[in-house]
Amino acid sequence: MIVTINGNERSRYPELIDQMHVLRKEVFHERLKWDVEIKGDWEIDKFDDYDPLYLLSLDDAGYVRGALRLLPTTGPNMLRDVFHCLLPAGEIIESPVIWESSRFCVSLRDRDGNRSLSNLNTATAEIIAAMGEVGVLAGLSNIVTVYDHFLRRIISRAGCDETLVGGPVDIGGVKTYAGMFKVDEYDLEQFKLRWGLEGDLINHQEPRVIGAAA
Amino acid sequence: MDNSVNRLLHHLLDELQNISQSGDTPPNKVNSDQYLLDSILSCYGLENLAYITTDPFSLESRDPIYKVTYSSEWQEFYLRTDAENHDPAVIYGLREIVPFEWRNVELYDPAQLAFLNVASDFGLGENGFSIPIRDRFGARALVSMTISLNDQKWEKYSRRYRSELVNIAYLLHERFSPKCNSSIEEKYIGEDLTAREIESLQWTALGKTSEETAIILGLSKRSVNFHVNNAKLKLDTVTRSHAVARASALGLILPVL
């Protein structure tokens, strides 16, 4: 199941947000050994302060098993503010119809601590499809992402076509790339069919209660 | 149909470009802003268009900036009652990321519900749609559109034009936000400096006199003075040090540490 959380409402979902940051530490710090900021059990950086949109994949028991973060490229984002060295000199990606995804991570184990390939696959497919749905809702043409070889392989194995727009560049000992994905409703439907995903993934949530929280 | 809309849009954007480069005086700018909004309305068959931004960096004015096509009665009512405090599109929208349809927002606050009732009395269109914007300066804005289409037609319409409307929303922000606007103007300053003018200015920045610069560049002292004076004019500055400071701030010459 997918849950979307708007960054400015993080405090309303303390458990899910906690599980996401713990998973991110496990994946990026411990497993992939990226040079990321660690605070206690969490991996968290300044882009989490810019009210991103989080997509979380929950398992049947309601625990976070995968996550991804989306930011518009017109505002602060990683590719422009941190990884501009990935793009040819002087080039920037800044468009109202291109967003950036970052911190895509999926747990390799299920809740009982067993390695679970089906968990990994379902979470990956679910998050990619949800990202496509957000793209359609937001009228996007593309989503750009900064990733390493390992993530690239996961995403391409899931059946996503990317166009390499930058890299590889060695950043902190990690071969880093920038890739561009097309947002296309037809491709999205095909992708969901292939993975047996039915209905809207991000629209099932209860209507937003505003005013009550303000 | 798609093509004609695209053509219209491009025409509009060209015109917008001309307007922003012609350095209009404020009253003309107000008119051209209104013209731009009205053209978008007719181009896309919208009922109303509203732009609002809050600039986190502007200390002197905490008031948001508005550009709207709503009726003057509605605008008057809005300003008189400080309605942005109860306007759900604004309260909700400035915090949002993903464009949203008003009908999907569920309200519980009585003040906001009352606001919507008044709004519908003013006849603001059946379906509303808001596009949140974030820019590179950290400012946020919201472009809202209303249209008189029933849900089914609106569904089709929105599918087809969403991307274009998102692009337009951002263009409006670039034009109306004070920060974006001033940075666009700054970009033009000094862009026409020649290589000689930049070189002469660079040596001036390093403390060289015109005579010394002339020797270094293999020019006459007169030529160096000529280049520096041209640079002064193009940078809209009055003294050499003023010109050096601005050229350095604009990144045209290397800063002297």
Image (cartoon, helix red, strand yellow):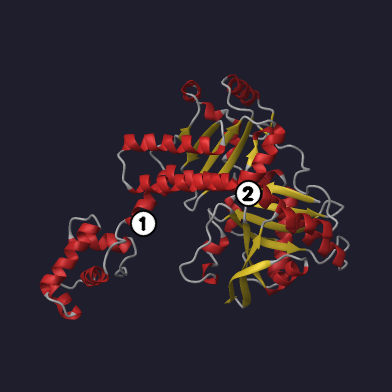
State whether discs 2 and 1 lie on one chain. no
**Chain under callout 1:** B
| Alpha carbons under labels 2 and 1: distance apart | 29 Å
Locate residue A190 relative to residue B135 in the image: left or right: right
* Above-or-below relation of B70 to B178: above
Relative to B26, A56 lies left or right = right
Which mark lies nearer to you, 2 or 1?
2
Circles 2, 1 touching at the beta carbon (< 8 Å): no
Whole-percent x and y of residue B24?
31, 41
SS state under label 1: helix
Q: Say whether residue B47 is visible.
A: yes
Residue drawn at x 54%, y 40% as measured from the top left: B142
In the picture of the structure, the residue carrying the numbered disc 1 is B187
The number of numbered discs placed on residues in the rendered structure image is 2
From this view, report whether residue A173 is shown above or below residue B113.
below
Depth check, front residue: B213 or A181:
A181
For this rendering, which residue is in front, B88 or A111? B88
Image coordinates for residue A214, horizontal then vertical, percent = 63, 34
Residue B111 lies, with reference to residue B188, above or below; the image says above
Three-letter code for the amino acid on which mark 2 is drawn: Gly
Q: Which residue is mark 2?
A: A139
| Residue B174, image x, y percentages | 45, 47
Residue type at mark 1?
Lys
Q: Residues within 10 Å of mark 1 (few under 14, many from 20)?
A: few
